[in-house]
Image (cartoon, rainbow, N blue to C red):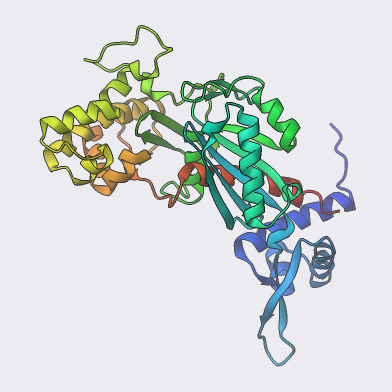
Amino acid sequence: MSRSPGTPRLLRRLNDRSALELLLYQGPLTRAELGEQTGLSKVTAGQLLARLEDRGLVEVVGERAGGRGPHAALYAVVPSSAYVAGLEVLPDSLTVGVADITGKIVVEVTVNPRGTKDPVKAVHSAVQRACASANISQSQLRSFVIGTRGVVDPRSGDVRFSHDLPDWHVGVLASLRNTLGASVTIENDVNLVALAEHRYGAAAGHEDFAVIWAGIGQGLGVMLGGRLHRGLTGGAGEIGWLPVPGEPLPTDVRHPQSGSFQRLVGHEALEGLAKHHNVSGLSVADQVRNGGDRYLDEVAARLAVGCAAIAVVLDPGLIVLSGDIGRAGGARLAAKVEQAVARVCPSPSRVVTTGVAGNPVLRGALVAALEQAREQVFSDTV
């Protein structure tokens, strides 16, 4: 099989991409430092930087003192060369975060969408408000990633089913792209939490892990070999439906609170458990945060049922507890869950609490949006 030789244009593009990524993750850098790390000569590195500077992608941000000669200019990526938007959509709130190309969040806006049943109008209005707050135009946004509850079809990108967001249905994605542009993506919210944990949180440096979202609803995000596992129809991770010994099986899957694991660890179940241990009267998160060892042991034993199922099927090595229950229980709950899993599972995983600060769905949406935007911007330099 014959191969086409690399063209100078292609090689320049590859070198530009490599240089921009180095400047993002290790910068600012001098011309000599960039040449050393990319393997380019000083002359070629200088030409590359001049080209990227002409395109408005890099700029001089300072100097580095050297020997007896003049100080060397320090180059960095221009933050305003592109922006992205990440969104979290809930039944009673819509949060938009805008970040520049370096990943710095420049604004975060939350609005109440209950005034409209049109998801496209609600999203567009929230994005416009965020852009106004960030003092940028909508045309500067290169990518939009929206996190929602429910099942997202990985083939079409449409929301296939969402009990909490009935107006988000097949056809909404096409309408959003007509309004905001072709770079709109919808993703399951817990999958985005997994991306955030991988980039910023407890799963940084791990290519195989799972995130359990423990809260009002139960969800699972799985990353294998550094890639999200969504399943054929997008249904991977619907752990609330996991069959559990002693809990009734659902008779109608149209009722999401009827899943066996949901019945075991959902808010209603934990509130009943708290009454039994005389720690009721608080929110479920506060009960978990302030409950005694006997109460927390029972919460951990229930969560361990789901963790053990994940461990014996996927053997991810690491399970991250997130959601309001996982966050509230912290390291204390995670340690108890790990011990409970080890008692019933031949291939136990390490269990840790979330390491993502702020809104994990929004952070994950911005991670995904930045990956898309950088692919566009950094691949179009020549």
Residue found at the far top of this picture: 251
Q: In this view of the protein, can residue 320 be seen by the observer?
A: no
Quadrant of residue 158 in the image?
Answer: top right
> Does residue 150 appear to the left or right of 308 in the view shown?
right
Residue drawn at the location 21% of the way across and 30% of the way down: 271
At which x and y percent is residue 360?
A: 46, 44
Residue drawn at the location 17% of the way across and 29% of the way down: 273
Q: Which corner quadrant holds the N terminus?
A: top right
Q: In this view of the protein, can residue 111 be seen by the observer?
A: yes
Residue found at the far front of this picture: 115
At which x and y percent is residue 329?
A: 27, 44
Number of numbered labels in the structure image: 0
Of 237 and 277, the residue lying toward us: 277
Residue drawn at the location 70% of the way across and 55% of the way down: 136
User: Is residue 156 positioned above or below 130 on the image?
Assistant: above
Residue drawn at the location 64% of the way across and 60% of the way down: 24
At which x and y percent is residue 372?
A: 68, 43
